[in-house]
Image (cartoon, rainbow, N blue to C red):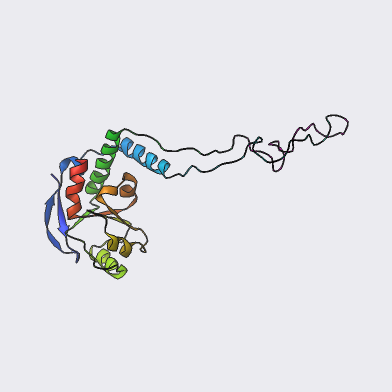
């Protein structure tokens, strides 16, 4: 079992913690990580883009000029795709971009993401994180105490409104909870800061 240090909000080591080997010491599967990230990014696309075909553009029911004798090219409608303000050929239509991946691949990807952070020593365990009110200054001080100067993701056991509000104005700092994590966010941030209470919930679900 991997052993990691536990810190308080002052950046002081207060003990050690054993992590679940299944979740935090698994073999990193890059193909599974790739599939999970591609599926996540695809699901973020709204897919509401739409263009009009020649049959949907208003007007164009009358032949603009007679077939022969004018010296101009033959034309049957002013809404032809080769005309200005005409229809669009093979243009985008509303669609669902979501990609289905096997649930086992999702689990392997989550385990790989957490394990990679442990291997790279980019995982920090916090003893507790309680904020009575939204204070960005307190969050800045916490990051300074933990010596975090890069993008970081906080994972709490349950949704913490004050923690979220304290961090939302800080560039590169994100806050989520154990029931709403995804592989993309874990890999996107350089440091992963998990509150001790959240570790048990993560191990219960994914291990």
The quarter in which the N terminus is drawn is: top left
Left/right placement of residue 150 relative to residue 156 reads right
* In-front residue for pair 65/168: 65
Where residue 56 sits in the image (x, y, percent)? 64, 37
* In-front residue for pair 184/95: 95
Residue at 18% in and 50% down = 199
* In-front residue for pair 176/141: 176
Where residue 59 sits in the image (x, y, percent)? 71, 40
Left/right placement of residue 74 relative to residue 23 reads right
Residue 107, relative to residue 193: is it above or below? above
Where residue 119 sits in the image (x, y, percent)? 22, 46
Report which quarter residue 5 is drawn in: bottom left
Within the magenta stretch, is there residue 88?
yes
Extreme-top residue of the structure? 68
Extreme-left residue of the structure? 15
The quarter in which the C terminus is drawn is: top left
Left/right placement of residue 172 relative to residue 177 reads right
Residue at 33% in and 35% down = 31
Within the magenta stretch, is there residue 80?
yes
Where residue 192 sits in the image (x, y, percent)? 26, 53
How many numbered discs sit on the rendered protein? 0
Q: Which residues are magenta?
A: 68-90
Q: Main secondary structure of the magenta part?
A: loop
Report which quarter residue 8 is drawn in: bottom left
* Residue 37 in sight in this render: yes
């Amino acid at each position: 079992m991997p052993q990691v240090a536990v810190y308080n909000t002052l950046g002081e080591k207060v003990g050690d913690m054993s992590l679940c080997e299944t979740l935090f010491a698994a073999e990193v599967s890059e193909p599974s990580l790739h599939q999970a990230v591609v599926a996540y990014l695809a699901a973020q696309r709204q897919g509401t883009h739409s263009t009009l075909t020649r049959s949907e553009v208003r007007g164009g029911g009358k032949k603009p000029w007679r077939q022969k004798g004018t010296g101009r090219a033959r034309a049957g409608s002013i809404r032809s795709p080769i005309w200005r303000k005409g229809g669009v050929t093979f243009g985008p239509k509303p669609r669902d971009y979501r990609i289905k991946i096997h649930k086992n691949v999702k689990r392997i990807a989550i385990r790989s993401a957490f394990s990679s952070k442990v291997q790279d020593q980019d995982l920090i365990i916090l003893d507790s994180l309680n904020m009575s009110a939204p204070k960005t200054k307190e969050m800045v001080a916490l990051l300074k105490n933990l010596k975090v100067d890069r993008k970081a993701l906080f994972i709490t056991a349950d949704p913490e409104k004050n923690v979220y509000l304290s961090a939302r104005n800080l560039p590169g700092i994100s806050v989520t909870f154990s029931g709403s994590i995804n592989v993309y966010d874990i890999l996107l941030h350089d440091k992963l800061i998990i509150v001790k209470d959240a570790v048990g919930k993560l191990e219960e679900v994914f291990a």
